[in-house]
Amino acid sequence: MAIELATKFATNVDELFKNESKKSLLTNQDYDWTGAHTIKVYKVSTSQMNDYDRNGANVSENWSRYGAVKDLDATTEELTLTKDRSFTFAIDKLDADETAQTLAGASALARQQREVIIPEVDSFVYKTMSEKAGHKPEAKELTVDNIYTEILAASSALDDAEIPETERVLLVSPATYALLKKSPDVVMDTDVGQDMRLKGVIGNLDGAAVVKVPAVRLPDNFGFMLAHPSATVAPTKLEDYTVHENPPGISGSLVEGRICYGAFVLDNKSKGIYYQAASEAV
């Protein structure tokens, strides 16, 4: 007697785990690229302070009682979008039907966004911030004993640069976060509001929101980054995704997508980012 046992395919898909993006906590969308691929941002100089010449003893053609008369500089920096990325794939109509619709266009598109697009954009933003940081000390070994000292140094550097004390974000990898948890000097406030937890904040350390990001989205030998969101502009000018049903030449769906994005650290605000690289993997 022979019995062939039944095989059943579940309609649920074994999806990959992927983190949501947390870059919005460290960046801003203050500039508008509508109708342009490049924008110019003005940088205006200031005037030095002088001792007022009360008696007018030094007054001359170019020198008043207030001091030497100078013109202010008004230079610009160009922000040009450099990332114009795309993808496409087809889903045969029978493939979709005979896999219990697990290959449906809409779900496949959502998977593409979650597993491919978001990680790529995050990695580009964090790489740009680390390269353009206004504070970049020499790489050093981070340990349980020195991690808090190094974070205090970062906080002090931002203080001396007169960076706002509010809205600062401490970006760490899981390995660096483990050092913080093990350090006897660190007292982290984990009483974070639900709205901030949904955005990715897991705690607060010395006034900075602590955000943990997978190491795969960070530069190699990433230690930690303390940043103010005003320093980095991370625009997405175009995000266009389409599912074409039965286009010419395909019996099924054709999925196409395009995203144009960028990341810019403003010259006058670069001191709002402190990046500490590790001399070896944490």
Image: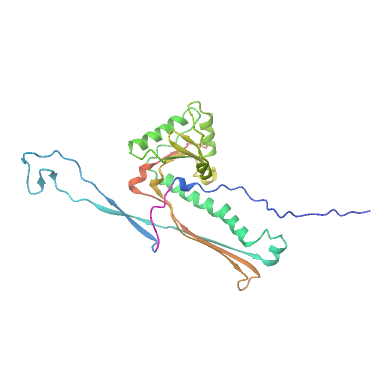
Q: Is residue 282 visible?
A: no
Name the one closer to the observer, 215 or 243.
Answer: 243
Asked whether residue 216 is drawn in magenta, I would say: no
As drawn, which residue projects farthest toward the bottom?
A: 248
Image position, residue 176 (x, y; %): 51, 36
87 lies above or below 138: below
Q: How is the image coloured?
A: rainbow
How many numbered discs sit on the rendered protein? 0
As drawn, which residue projects farthest toward the right?
A: 1
Image position, residue 30 (x, y; %): 39, 52
Classify residue 242 by image quadrant: bottom right
Image position, residue 236 (x, y; %): 45, 56
10 lies above or below 135: below
As drawn, which residue projects farthest toward the top?
A: 184
Lateral position of residue 45 relative to residue 30, left or right: left
31 lies above or below 53: below
Q: Which residues are magenta?
A: 27-34
Asked whether residue 33 is drawn in magenta, I would say: yes
Q: Is residue 183 visible?
A: yes
Secondary structure mostly seen in magenta is: loop
Lateral position of residue 99 relative to residue 68, left or right: right
Task: Name the residue located 33 percent from the left edge and 36 percent from the top edge.
Answer: 160
Task: Name the residue located 62 percent from the left edge and 58 percent from the top edge.
Answer: 107
